[in-house]
Amino acid sequence: MITLLDGPLGTELIARGVSLDSDQWSAEALVNATERISQIHAEYLDAGAQVHTANTFRTGPTHCGVRWRDLARKAVTLAEEQIQNHTQKQPAKRPPTDAQTFDASDGARKFTGLTAKDATSHYRLAGSIGPIADCYRPDLSPGLESKSEHREMAHYLVECGCDILFCETFANPDEAVTAVREAAKTGHETWISLTTGPETNLMSPQQMATLAARCADAGATAVLVGCTPAACSLDYLQAIEKLKLGVTLGVKANAGPMNGDYGWHSVIDLERKNATTQVTAAQRYADLAQRWIDHGATLIGACCGCSPKHIAELASRLKSRREKANSMTWS
């Protein structure tokens, strides 16, 4: 079964005219643009995303100081509110019977069947745990010294009600493994996305696969190729796939170069020009996503430079894929 994730918050806020110039980056919007955050969550819900990530990527103590808990809880609350609003508008229905959850026995967390929560809600909430330094500057990472902050963040996100702890966009191996280990210790489902950076120069496919194995050993239930250019993500996914790690695989790619064909179209541009440009970019992204699925990815979403239109196109393709599979079953 394919699970559809949401898309980016940070670059989508910028596309809507929100200034994110400080070290807090997307956390800035929790002070001055909460309505925009809510709007983006709502649009990802309307587009068909099943897993929604709270805007906690930069709400840790290092970036937000003494108010970090207030901002993290606010981020989780904004996402929860939109999920509840959206759910109330929908007719009651059960998720597919092969929906995924996990069994934490013996520390080997593997997906098995439905949870009680899944029986009443089609949506899940992920708390984002980001690198302490810039995600594209792994050389600045505190590495193993990040342990206490990641532990504190993980436990607080669980307290706030997140279903999944999503360690997002890591490139420093020691910090990635540390974040996963501390998140997994909470007993909550833990995901990790690894990035090679916008220029694909932070690690090779083999290096990412090696790090993916370390993260799986540390307790990750899912490993994703994250915030890596969409056109390059397959090479990294295939390298991880070959290791047969026994965890769920996924891709949450970025749109690549700003002059490329996969995204980076702001809302203002769409209002002034032709919306077909962004639709075409979403279609190209979805073409690549079909190849990721063919190579074992079951968690599919989008990252920087993408938009709710990308998620809507992915949802449409997945629906067509299911319908085709069902018709083949009955033929």
Image (spheres, rainbow, N blue to C red):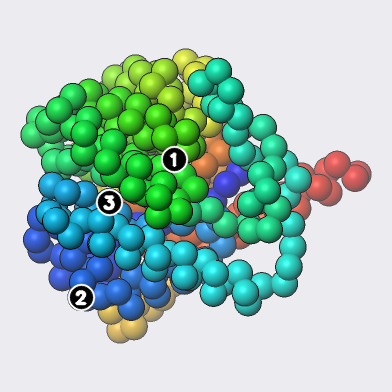
- Amino acid type of the residue tagged 1 in the rendering: Val
Give me the residue at 39% from left, 68% from top: 78
Which of pointers 2 and 1 indicates the residue nearer the eye? 2
Are the residues flagged by discs 2 and 1 in contact, CB closer than 8 Å? no
Residue nearest the observer in this picture, 205 or 9: 9
Q: Is residue 79 visible?
A: yes
Q: How many marks?
A: 3
> Which element type, helix, strand or loop, lies under badge 1?
strand
> Which element type, helix, strand or loop, lies under badge 2?
helix
Q: Quadrant of the N terminus?
A: top right
Residue bearing mark 1: 251
Q: Earlier in the sequence, mark 2 or mark 3?
A: 2
Where is residue 182? Give x, y as percent.
33, 31
- Amino acid type of the residue tagged 3 in the rendering: Phe
Where is residue 224? Give x, y as percent.
42, 36
Residue bearing mark 3: 57
Q: Quadrant of the C terminus?
A: top right
Reply above or below: 19 against 212: below
Where is residue 314? Give x, y as percent.
54, 55
> Which element type, helix, strand or loop, lies under badge 3?
loop
- Left or right of 214 in this view: 32: left
Residue nearest the observer in this picture, 240 or 10: 10
Give me the residue at 49% from left, 59% from top: 311
- Left or right of 156 in this view: 98: right
**Dot 3 alpha-carbon crowd within 10 angstroms: few under 14, some 14 to 19, many 20 or more:** many
Q: Earlier in the sequence, mark 3 or mark 1?
A: 3
For the residues labelled 3 and 1, the Cα–Cα distance comes to 18 Å
- Amino acid type of the residue tagged 2 in the rendering: Asn
Residue nearest the observer in this picture, 270 or 2: 2
Q: Earlier in the sequence, mark 2 or mark 1?
A: 2
Are the residues flagged by discs 3 and 1 in contact, CB closer than 8 Å? no
Residue 32 shows which numbered tag? Answer: 2
